[in-house]
Amino acid sequence: MRSRGLSDDAKRGRARFALCVRNEGYPAGLELRKVYRVLADEQASKLHHLRVIDESGEDYLYPEDYFVFIRLSRATEKAVR
């Protein structure tokens, strides 16, 4: 499913998280099967990219099809922030 701008969670101020399922071309920046925090970025979404805090600790754009959105429990979300 393609991203369509800000999700309901993002609009409510909840963090969004995604599981990395591909990393071709970005092996140093993305680890397969790792959960990443996604930052809201409507411009990136229009280009079918996500703004993700990657292994460098900085936010970068990656193709959205490299990730699958997941929903964490509030307790888990709080622990990984």
Image: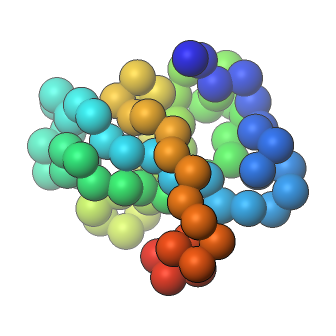
Instruction: From this view, report whether residue 75 is shown above or below residue 48.
Output: below
Side of 68 relative to 50 (left or right): left
Which residue is depicted at the point 37% across and 45% down? 19
Instruction: From this view, report whether residue 74 is shown above or below residue 10.
Output: below
Looking at the picture, how far across and down is residue 9, in whole percent?
76, 50
Looking at the picture, how far across and down is residue 28, in whole percent?
15, 51
The answer to which of 71 and 12 lies nearer the viewer is: 71
Rendered-image quadrant of the N terminus: top right
Which residue is depicted at the point 46% across and 27% down? 64
Q: Is residue 24 visible?
A: yes
User: How many numbered badges does the structure rendering display?
Assistant: 0
Which residue is depicted at the point 17% across and 28% down? 24
Instruction: From this view, report whether residue 25 is shown above or below residue 57.
Output: above
User: What colour scheme governs how the chains and residues are painted in the rendered image of this protein?
Assistant: rainbow
Residue 36 image-quadrant placement = bottom left
> Which residue is the extreme one toward the bottom?
79
Q: Is residue 81 visible?
A: no
Side of 78 relative to 12 (left or right): left
Side of 38 relative to 55 (left or right): right
Instruction: From this view, report whether residue 28 is shown above or below residue 75.
Output: above
Residue 25 image-quadrant placement = top left
The answer to which of 75 and 52 lies nearer the viewer is: 75
Looking at the picture, how far across and down is residue 49, in whole percent?
51, 28
Which residue is depicted at the point 85% across and 50% down? 11
Looking at the picture, how far across and down is residue 71, in whole percent?
57, 51
